[in-house]
Amino acid sequence: MPPESTRPPQDLESLLAHLRASFPTLSTQFQSGARYLLDHPQEVPVLSMRKIAVSAGVQPATLVRLSQHLGFEGWQGLRELFVDALRGGSQPYARRARKVVRESGSSRMLAEMLDAQHHNLDMIASSNDKALTQAAEMLAAAASVHIAGFRSCFPIAFTFHYVYRLFRSSVHLIRGEAGTLEMELRALAPKDAVVVTSFAPYSQESIRVATAAREAGCKVIALTDSTVAPIALAADCTLLFSVESPSFFPSITAGIATVEALVEQLLARKGKGAIRALEQAEGELHRTGAYVPAERT
């Protein structure tokens, strides 16, 4: 049993932050276990304690003792934080949807939604002031830029790809359609940069892209909801956005706004070259009939 004075972390972000802060003071065996938890959080909910111990190079009893050292009664209590984060927190979509249905027709619904979106947008500046500049520098210096976002994060990735490609041709969207993700990942090269976006519950595909990018020697930029998200733990730069929403599903509004702000910085960096590329792209769109002619609108 842990000492009564030791209160365990209440969420995954707090746990991982505590492990990082206390890492130098841990025993060698505890450091091996902690290192695995920090580097492979996506594996903890799906693997047995014995398999995790083998991968970490420790005995299963070490993971139990580490859990107790952190204030948990045992391994299961610590593991639950990883499971909860994988599920996207304590309120899965269906449970949150019931609340929305109960309150349908409420005059507060629109106001609450707008308040949440305002808050999410306000958080962008405070969370990414320096990181946006850092990300822009990495992308501008890259030979090619690859962008990935799956399921609900696809609109964020697609927006960034579409707008950035208007003035830069070496921008590629990783789609993974029809099981071709591995084939697309072969194109990653050491001088490239990869932008991966995901929020809890994190998609396995996004983790695979981030892992492949690191192995290929690319710069990795994570666009996510937490500094300890699986794609952020080993990223070269992390851009944060809030997904809070009174509705049943997380909001991507701030994610879209973040990539729009990033593209703005990239355009400013490229200067006249970007303007020429934009003029050419706009001219081609008009020439090919992509837009309704002005005299018909």
Image (cartoon, rainbow, N blue to C red):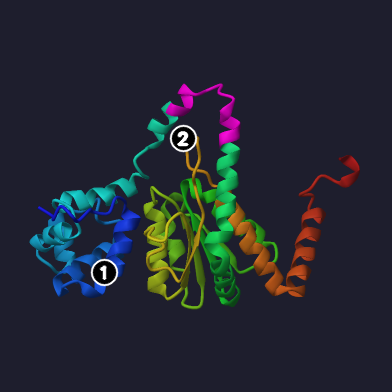
Which residue is located at x 75 percent, y 61 percent?
281
Callout 1, which amino acid?
Answer: Ser
Magenta span of residues = 99-112
Question: From the viewer's perspective, is residue 226 above or below residue 234?
Answer: above
The one nearer the camera, 25 or 89, is: 25
Question: From the viewer's perspective, is residue 64 above or below residue 35?
Answer: above
Q: Position of residue 243 (x, y in %)?
A: 49, 47
Q: Earlier in the sequence, mark 2 or mark 1?
A: 1
Which residue is located at x 59 percent, y 58 percent?
259
Question: From the viewer's perspective, is residue 280 above or below residue 225?
Answer: below
* Label 1 secondary element: helix
Q: Main secondary structure of the magenta part?
A: helix
At label 2, counting other C-alpha atoms closer than 10 Å, the crowd grade (few under 14, some 14-19, many 20 or more) is some
203 left or right, relative to 108: left
Cα–Cα gap, marks 2 and 1: 36 Å
* Label 2 secondary element: loop
- Give the numbered dot on residue 248: 2
Which residue is located at x 23 percent, y 54 percent?
8
